[in-house]
Image (cartoon, coloured by chain):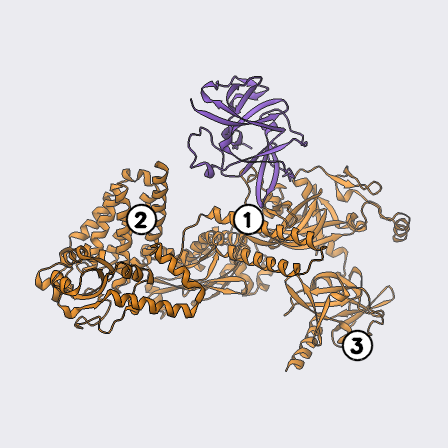
Amino acid sequence: MAERQFSSLYIGEALFGIDILLIREINKHLEITPVDQAPDFVRGLLNLRGQVITVLDLGIRLGMGALRISKASRCVILKTSSELSGVEGLDDNTCEDVVGLLVDRVGDVVGIDTTSMEPPPANVNGVDSRYMQGVVKLEDDLMVVINVGEVLRMEDKT
Amino acid sequence: MKNRDEAMLNELVIESREQLSRIEPDLLALEKGGEVPRETINRIFRAVHSVKGGFSFFGMVNIKDLTHVIENVLMKIRDGELEVGPSLVDALLAGLDKLRVMLDDVKNSERIDFSKESKLLLAFEETKISPEEKSEVKTRPEKEGVEEDNQWEDADIESLPLSPEILESTAEKRKHLYLIAVQTKKHLLEKERSTASFIKELQLYGDILHSDPDIFMLAEQKGGGSEDQIIKIVFATALKPNMLIPEIKVDERYVQWFRSGEVRESIRNMKNIRKQKNPEKTDKTGEAALSGNTENTESIRVKVNLLDKIVDLAGELVLGRNQLVRQLKDLDMPGLNAIIQNINMVTSDLQENIMNTRMQPIGNIFGMFMRIVRDMARQLHKEIEISFSGENVEMDKSILEALTDPLVHLVRNCVDHGIETSAERKKQGKRREGHILLSASHQSGQINIEIKDDGKGIDLVRVKDKAVEMGILTREAAETTSDQDAYLLLFEPGFSTAGEVTETSGRGVGLDVVKTNIEKLSGVIELSTQRGKGTTVFLKLPLTLAIIPSLMVTSEERQFAIPQVCLEQLVHIRANEVSSRIEKVQGHEVIRLREKLLPVVRLNQVLDMEETFIHPGTKERKPDARKNLSDRRDKIPPAKEIKEKRKEQEDRRQSFSSGVNIAVLKAGSNRYGLLVEKFLNNEEIVVKPLSMYIKKCKSYSGVTILGNGKIAMILDSAGIAEQANLQFGELAGESEKQALEYARKSENKTWPFLIFRSSRNEVLSIELSKIARVEKVKADAIEKIGDQEYLKYSDTSLRIIRPYDYMPIKRPESVSEFLYVIVPKQTKFPVGIVAVKVIDVIDISPAIDNTSLKGTGIEGSMVINDTLIVVMDVHSLLEAVNHESSGVSG
């Protein structure tokens, strides 16, 4: 019965969703300073009201190629794990650092009955299944719910 | 609900940990023997008791049981049934340590075994001291005068140890106030009443507002406490004396009564006095009292990340203010300036105060040293005392945390190698106990820390010998090394591993690590030692790490910050000298600097940036195909040709910057040149940590937000050296060879001199190495104060010196719009020497003729290209200036 609300985001035409409880704010200020030598999916750093935010390129992270910044581009800034520590009913987590995800476009907030969420298929739009929590059928589209914890995870090898 | 419990538990753990660390010095004081103030034992007892109370509330049986055992032993000590000795303190410390282990992993504390500790403690609990010994136990009542009968004579309400809020609420409830003084032996024990039951009885009739000693201490006393003491109690009840006194069975001579009316009256008086003192505040106190807020909060616990956020926001406020000021500057509104100035002041004040919230007293870490010294000394069978001074000196939390390890290392060194055994000390006629002094003090924005011992000192001759043996120093160099410089060898990496040196001369164990750590904190370490007398290590540290002065540089259109601490010097190599100054050795680019070869790293290469250059015609950035700086300009056209070329084509690549900018950086004991595109300004930057995604990039030590809101990475000089895979060792040999060759080639050594004019005629020069920097300023920026001229220059003001005022040279005839100010290095007060024109920097051999030209501020003269150049003696010029100004003022 539990209904959760997801912010819908686009990479190209592919639709993704992130639980709004994980999101601190969505920003269109995109003056990103690149960091040389950082892993490729790190787009750079952003000054958000005096706080330095690491912006990850969700396109590269999901294996869909680097995003091009346009007028519709947005930065989805996530809450830190300590901010989330008091929130109940979450099955996903973020990390200690303040991280923003660069996406091509942001859509509406969609309410979804969690029982209608299906386990992720092996591959949607070239996205590895480990980055997906599940798939939800909307009226005219298929929304991939992102496994944020996995997207933010920093592999030890790099 | 669960969350809240957990938060409470966490809070309790933090608090308990703090309490335990606070009582450790007390315990160690107990061991020292002598008169132990009751208050010390009480303090220990209270801390342990409150830990016990807290955790038994959470049902943590293990913690409760262990604290209970400790408490029992403490009680015996307090009641004089146990004599304190090293083994008892050992047992107590072991107990506390185990308690800490439990606190560290509170959730699993139930599974931690503490049977060993409790057995140790129980053994003490069961021992009893014979009555004769008992009298010798060194506890004493807090105040003399057990015989004094009426403790409260002449006491008045104002002098009671109660807060006005408590008094007020007592008055509000129309309660009477009683002061009761009882002597435990005379009034209670002899009448077969125990202190605890007396307290309980009292509590039946009213509230105990204050007692001396603490009531819960009294309540814990088994059998009413054995020794005689006076208990003073402030008691509030609605009962009148004729009702109360028969109930509590205390002689009325020992009870003083204040009617509720009296209490109200005196509160009114106190309020009036306060109203006169600061009229605005009285309303607030009234409010606090009404809301029943009787707690007196001196400090609150704030999460560090919340503080960091506030610091960020304050920084952002500064940026916002700057933008506002820029926008409003053109508006001509009356009164606006005052408002802006006000905002300005408030903002800076706010920022400063917020920075202060991060400050903590250094005493916080001093506490742990008592324990370290004690434990080590016992192990090594030495007798060592440690004392402290300046515990209240405050420093930034982050520095304090990073300072702990080096300090521990240094103190351990003192104990281990510095101080001799008691027998040895006796032989030398020293005091039996060795002494270590740890002191801290503030000095002009810095913190000085001293670790001083009266041990055997370091044999610097042996140190030098060992250095030669290890190949750190040549034999010749060793002979010329003064003792003051010899100690620097101790900080050489690898020096520590030399076994015999550490045995004969002590010290040197891993001192290079300490030095690196201190330098990481932008600090300095120095050492002085005297054979047989002792060694002192001096540390100089900045107050805060959060803000560091840095040089801003660019590379490929990106800005980077280089912390000033790792900056040695800046070198600009002009286009026509690039190929002669930068060359290749074993495939590495190197620069020759003062006859030494330094490896050169290009920032854009080490960071794998796309290399570009600005095309002179189109002013566009284009990929750069050149691979080596030394590749170009193989043949230098004669100077004349270059001049011609310059005439016909104003901007070639990019006028000035067709040369090369190199920042010489320190990386540990090594140096290297970092080639960047441009040097910008110096800026004080706020350091922010790197996120986990970037932490692995060795080249950065942090990130900062600049005044314009842009983000710049802070470069890590050691990290870049590592990243670029610089082989200092290999190059060192090569560079020595090359340096020798170079020296042979140019028989006459040459030094760079700055050539300038301070008036039309004379050409002056100062050796470049004596100059800190040269600034171009507007002539009207120089302000006149009395006879002296000053220039505002970053934070300080420069005393401006016009050489012709002191030297036998002509004054300029006309006034120029711009002036150059030469700032010499190492002057007593900041000084700027005025020049009207800076001509050049040239390498000249210091074959100075110091006979033909003489005078104040003149070292000599030389002739170059038929021009007479006056070589200035900055030192004597400043002496003349100094002399004059002191003459004027005196």
Relative height, residue B624 to residue B678 (above, below): above
Q: Nearer the viewer, residue B710 or B254?
A: B254
- The residue wearing badge 1 is B312
From the viewer's perspective, is the residue at label 2 or at label 1 nearer? 1
Q: Is residue B629 left or right of residue A146?
A: right
Q: CA distance from mark 2 to mark 3?
A: 76 Å
Q: Is residue A73 shown left or right of residue B453?
A: right
As helix, strand or loop, the secondary structure at mark 3 comes to loop
* Residue drawn where x is 30% and y is 40% of the image: B109
Q: Which mark is residue B808?
A: 3
Quarter of the figure that contains the N terminus of chain B: top left
Q: Which chain is purple?
A: A
Look at the numbered disc 1 and give the secondary structure of its residue.
Answer: helix
Q: Chain of mark 1?
A: B
Q: Tag 2's secondary structure?
A: helix
Please state which amino acid type lies under the numbered disc 1.
Asp
Query: Looking at the image, is B881 positioned above or below residue B118?
Result: below
Colour in which the image shows chain B: orange
Q: Nearer the viewer, residue B370 or A22?
A: A22
Picture quadrant where residue B789 is located = bottom right
Chain bearing tag 3 is: B
Chain for mark 2? B
Q: Is residue B648 left or right of residue B207?
A: right
Q: Quadrant of residue A63?
A: top right
Give the amino acid type for the residue marked by disc 3 in the picture.
Answer: Pro
Same-chain check, marks 2 and 3? yes
Q: Position of residue B756 (x, y in %)?
A: 79, 65
Q: Are marks 2 and 1 on the same chain?
A: yes
Label drawn at residue B97: 2
